[in-house]
Image (cartoon, grey):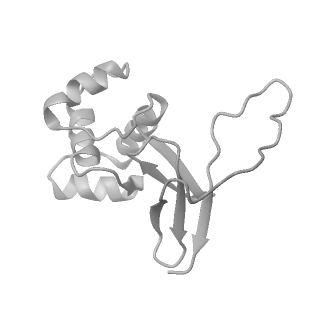
Amino acid sequence: MTMTCVPGNLMDRLRGAGLRPTRQRIALARLLFEDGDRHLTAEQLHTMALTADIRVSLATVYNTLHQFTDAGLLREIVVDSGRSYFDTNTSDHHHFFYERSGRLEDIPFGQVQLTAVPQAPEGTSIRRVDVVVRVDG
């Protein structure tokens, strides 16, 4: 299910996810969800917020992104130890990562087929499988 939001239901969507719709959460949610599915880093969202004259710290952006992720509104895609993207499309899907440009792009559904997944270690369960295909570009 894609979590594309329209401004009229942002407050309901936040409340439905168990989050209090604060001014900053609503402002950041508008930036995240108003243009459909996409992948953003915290730094990109922070820059967008400043450009839109939304006064918010980078720490608040990180906290909000992690709160939205924990609430199921976003997916975090870790491409390396120092870089994460936040995906507004929360459905199960995989990604191309363009190493030169740093762009992350959805792989069309059905183009990655997993034939086997290892057993989860004892006492754990597999939550999700993320495939990130690294390409030049």
Quarter of the N terminus within the rendering: top left
Q: Residue at x 82, y 42 (%)?
A: 118
Q: Is residue 38 above or below residue 57?
A: below
Q: Nearer the viewer, residue 119 or 23?
A: 119
Query: Relative to 50, is 67 on the left or the right?
Result: right
Q: Is residue 74 above or below residue 112?
A: above
Instruction: Estimate the x, y position of residue 69 in percent, counting from the top left.
Output: 46, 36
Image quadrant assignment for residue 11: top left
Query: Relative to 100, is 49 on the left or the right?
Result: left
Instruction: Estimate the x, y position of residue 119 in percent, counting from the top left.
Output: 83, 36
* Number of residue marks: 0
Instruction: Estimate the x, y position of residue 28 in percent, counting from the top left.
Output: 26, 42
Q: Nearer the viewer, residue 54 or 108?
A: 108
Instruction: Estimate the x, y position of residue 70 in percent, counting from the top left.
Output: 48, 30
Query: Relative to 34, is 78 on the left or the right?
Result: right
Q: Is residue 71 above or below residue 35?
A: above
Q: Residue at x 77, y 27 (%)?
A: 124
Q: Nearer the viewer, residue 131 or 101?
A: 131
Q: Residue at x 28, y 41 (%)?
A: 4
Image quadrant assignment for residue 90: top left
Q: Residue at x 31, y 53 (%)?
A: 46
